[in-house]
Amino acid sequence: MKNVLDIYLKDNNTNRYEVAKRANISEQTLSKASKRDPETYTAKTLIAIGKGIGATAGQVLDNLLAIRDSGKLYHATNISELRQKVREQEDEFILEGDFKELIQKIKTSIDFEDKYVRNDFIFPVFEYEGSVLFRVLKKNSSTKDEKVIKKLEKDIVNSYKIKILNDSETLFRLKN
C-alpha cells in the first residue's frame, strides 16, 4: 500500500516530523498511521494532522482518501527522502531531480530493443563502490559516510526495480 500520509503532507509542504512538533503527537504514531489505510486512522490522529497543517479532520480524511484512490505517488526529491522511502520499503515512488548521469548509465547498459524492455522495468545491476549509482548517491548526499551510501545502494539494488520515466523522473517499484 502506498504511503498516502506522506504524499498528503508533502503536498502541504510539510512532513511527519514537522506535524508531530506542531500538533503534539508522536512521530511514531504518524509513522504507524502512514502504513495503514486512511479509513483506519483514529479521530485523534486526523485531528492532529489537521492541526499540523491547518485543516479540519474531515478535510484531512477527504484528501487522504482522494489520494489513496488516485494513481498519485510520492515524489522523493533528495537523497534523504530516497533513503526514507527505501528504508520503509515503500511499494512505489518516483525519484525526481537531476540524476541524468545515473539514467544515462542505465540506458546505455541495457538493451532497449522494443521486444525486450521498452516500457518495462529494469532490474538494476551495478558494481558496488565504483558504480554510477554509488557516485550519484554520494554526490547528492549530505552525508559523506560511505558506509551509509553503500548500504543505500545495496538496498536499492536488492529491493527495487527501476523504470526510467524521463530525464528527471525514475520510478522505483518494490520487487515481489
Image (spheres, rainbow, N blue to C red):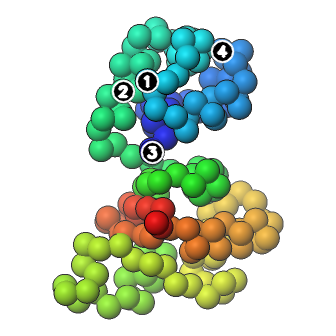
Tell me, for residue 65, which label it has, or none. Answer: 2
Residue identifier under label 1? 39
Say if residue 162 shows up in the picture.
yes
Q: Is residue 57 above or below residue 136?
A: above
User: In this view, which residue lies farthest toward the left?
Assistant: 114
Residue identifier under label 4? 23
* Mark 4 surroundings within 10 Å by alpha-carbon count, few (fewer than 14), some (14 through 19), many (20 or more): some
Sequence-wise, which precedes: disc 1 or disc 3? 3
Cβ atoms under marks 2 and 1 closer than 8 Å: yes
Q: CA gap, disc 2 to disc 3?
A: 13 Å
Cβ atoms under marks 2 and 4 closer than 8 Å: no
**Between tags 2 and 4, which lies in front?**
2
Instruction: Residue 113: give x, y in percent of width and height.
Output: 23, 89
The secondary structure type at the circle numbered 4 is: helix
Query: Which one is in front, 139 or 9?
Result: 9
Q: Which three-letter amino acid code belongs to the residue tagged 1?
A: Glu
Say if residue 104 shows up in the picture.
no
Q: CA gap, disc 2 to disc 1?
A: 8 Å
The secondary structure type at the circle numbered 3 is: loop
Instruction: Residue 52: give x, y in percent of width and height.
Output: 58, 17
Q: Which three-letter amino acid code belongs to the residue tagged 2?
A: Leu
Residue identifier under label 3? 1
